[in-house]
Image (cartoon, grey):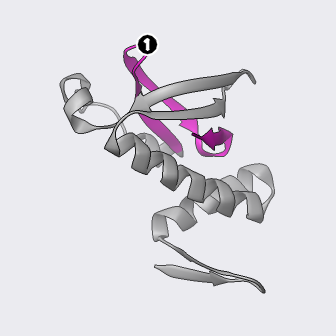
Amino acid sequence: MNIIVTDKSMVALSDSTIRRANVIAHRTNSEVMGVVKAQLINVLKAKLRSGVAHFLYVKKDGTLREAWGTTASNLIKANVNGRGIARESVNCVCYWDVECGGFRSLRFENLIQVF
C-alpha cells in the first residue's frame, strides 16, 4: 500500500492501482487523470465482482457505450475457457456483457462513469 499526500488530502493506493494510474497518466498525459480513473476502475471492478454493474465508457471507435456487465463467478464460470491472456496484463478491464451474452473489454482510460 502506498500513500500519496497532497496539500489538502491523503490517498492510499494499492500497487495495482498505482500501476493503472501510471498507464492512464501516460496515455492521457495527466497524472491527476491517472489517479482519478484508476480509482474509478477500482469502483467498477468491485461492482462487477458483486453483481451486475452499470457503467459508461468510450469505445475504440469514439462512440459512447452504456454497459451492464459482471465478473461474478456464478454467472460467467461456464464461459471461461482459460486459454486467453488476462485483460489486466494489456491494461483493460474485461467483463461479461449481460445484454449481449459475451465478453467485452475496455481500456482503463476510456471509463467515464460508474452508476
**Measured along the vertical axis of the image, is residue 88 above or below residue 85?**
below
Q: For the magenta stretch, what is the residue range?
A: 92-115
| Quarter assignment of residue 78 | top left
Residue at the image position 72 percent from the left and 56 percent from the top: 26
Label 1: element kind: loop
Q: In the rendering, at what x and y percent does residue 18 appear?
A: 56, 67
- Which residue was labeled with disc 1? 100
Quarter holding the C terminus? Answer: top right
Residue lying furthest top: 100
Residue lying furthest right: 29
- The residue nearer to you, when weighing 26 against 33, is 33
| Quarter assignment of residue 7 | bottom right
Residue lying furthest front: 115
Q: In the rendering, at what x and y percent does residue 81 appear?
A: 22, 27
- Is 78 situated left or right of 27 in this image? left
Residue at the image position 49 percent from the left and 46 percent from the top: 44
Q: Residues within 10 Å of mark 1 (few under 14, many from 20)?
A: few
Residue at the image position 68 percent from the left and 40 percent from the top: 112
- Is 57 situated left or right of 8 in this image? left
Residue at the image position 73 percent from the left and 21 percent from the top: 63
Which secondary structure dominates the residues rendered in magenta?
A: strand
Let me know if residue 26 appears in the view. Answer: yes
Q: Is residue 24 shown in magenta?
A: no
Let me know if residue 86 appears in the view. Answer: no
- Is 76 situated left or right of 11 in this image? left
Kind of residue sitting beneath label 1: Cys
Q: Is residue 95 shown in magenta?
A: yes
**Measured along the vertical axis of the image, is residue 80 above or below residue 88?**
above
Quarter holding the N terminus? Answer: bottom left
